[in-house]
Amino acid sequence: MQHVSSAALRKRRHRLVGGLPPLEQILRGSLIETYKRCGRPNCHCVDGPGHGPKRYLSTISRTGERPRLGYVPNASHDQVAEFLGNFRELQQMLNEICAINAELLRRRESLD
């Protein structure tokens, strides 16, 4: 970033801000997929992976807390996965914006 002009840094920052995912479509956590065996001796799950997939969202409210699991219906899986992806994208974009701002400060440039 040191060889990029300050104007180019500001332009990149502006493009990042304009491309942020919708904030109401953000979800932090992890999707967990499980398969379970029912225990019936004649069921198809005895030789296969099991019944499922059953999906759960693992979230942590505060640092140090145990993760909480919430069931995710199959109909909501794609949307939940998209929201989780939006969160990861947002994190990457915010990290880049912070790096640009830090570089502008290092150059003693205005952040505007």
Image (spheres, rainbow, N blue to C red):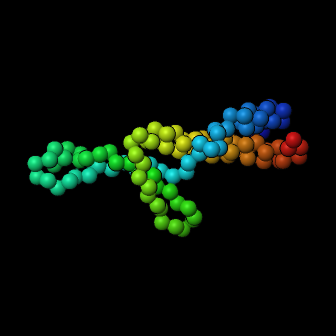
Vertical placement of residue 44 versus 67, above or below? above
Q: From this viewpoint, is residue 71 visible?
A: yes
Q: Residue at x 42, y 48 (%)?
A: 72
Q: Nearer the viewer, residue 74 or 18?
A: 74
Residue 1 percent across, percent down from the top left:
74, 38
Residue 55 percent across, percent down from the top left:
38, 48
Q: Nearer the viewer, residue 39 or 88?
A: 39
Dividing the image into 4 quarters, which one contains the C terminus?
A: top right
Q: Residue at x 46, y 38 (%)?
A: 78
Q: Which residue is drawn at 89% across and 46% down?
A: 108
Q: In this view, does 91 lie to the left or right of 58?
A: right
Q: From this viewpoint, is residue 3 visible?
A: no
Vertical placement of residue 33 versus 18, above or below? below
Residue farthest to the bottom?
Answer: 64
Q: Which of 13 and 45 is in front in this view?
A: 45
Residue 92 percent across, percent down from the top left:
63, 43
Q: In this view, does 54 lie to the left or right of 97?
A: left
Q: Which residue is drawn at 64% across and 38% down?
A: 21
The image quarter containing residue 97 is top right
Residue 20 percent across, percent down from the top left:
67, 38
Q: How many marks?
A: 0
Residue farthest to the left?
Answer: 42
Q: Nearer the viewer, residue 13 or 7?
A: 13
